[in-house]
Amino acid sequence: MRHLMLAVTMFLAGLAVTLGTASVLQDVAMAWTQNDRSDGFEVPQSAKSPIKPARQGRPISERLQDSHI
């Protein structure tokens, strides 16, 4: 019986922590969206990584011909 009471208590404590955290995070998100910022979230150009072109290897048809499949 003690194990059942301990399990129920731990479950309810975990549920309270989870729902409490979710409530706080939702309040923060709502406060953030209600700011007078009209541009939204922007990543500064200096923080963006440069776009690298795709690797230009040999076409798959040439690789298949070399393997004699």
Image: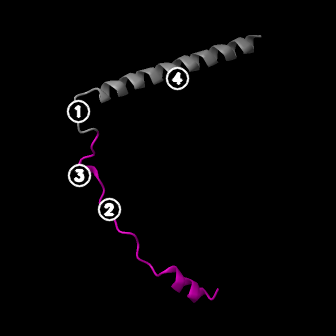
**Mark toward the viewer: 4 or 1:** 1
Per the image, the residue denoted by label 2 is 51
Mark 4 or mark 1, earlier in chain: 4
| Residue 29 percent coordinates (x, y) | 36, 28
Magenta-tinted stretch? 41-69
Category of crowding for the residue at label 2, using alpha-carbon neighbours closer than 10 angstroms: few (below 14), some (14–19), many (at least 20): few
Category of crowding for the residue at label 1, using alpha-carbon neighbours closer than 10 angstroms: few (below 14), some (14–19), many (at least 20): few
x 63%, y 19%: residue: 11
Vertically, is 58 above or below 44? below
Per the image, the residue denoted by label 3 is 46
Question: Callout 4, which amino acid?
Answer: Thr
In the rendered structure, find residue 37 and report the number of the disc placed on it: 1
The quarter of the displayed image where residue 2 is located: top right
The C terminus, quarter of image: bottom right
Mark 2 or mark 4, earlier in chain: 4
Answer yes or no: do the residues labelled 1 and 3 have beta carbons within 8 Å? no
Answer yes or no: do the residues labelled 4 and 3 have beta carbons within 8 Å? no
Q: CA distance from mark 2 to mark 4?
A: 39 Å
Mark 4 or mark 3, earlier in chain: 4
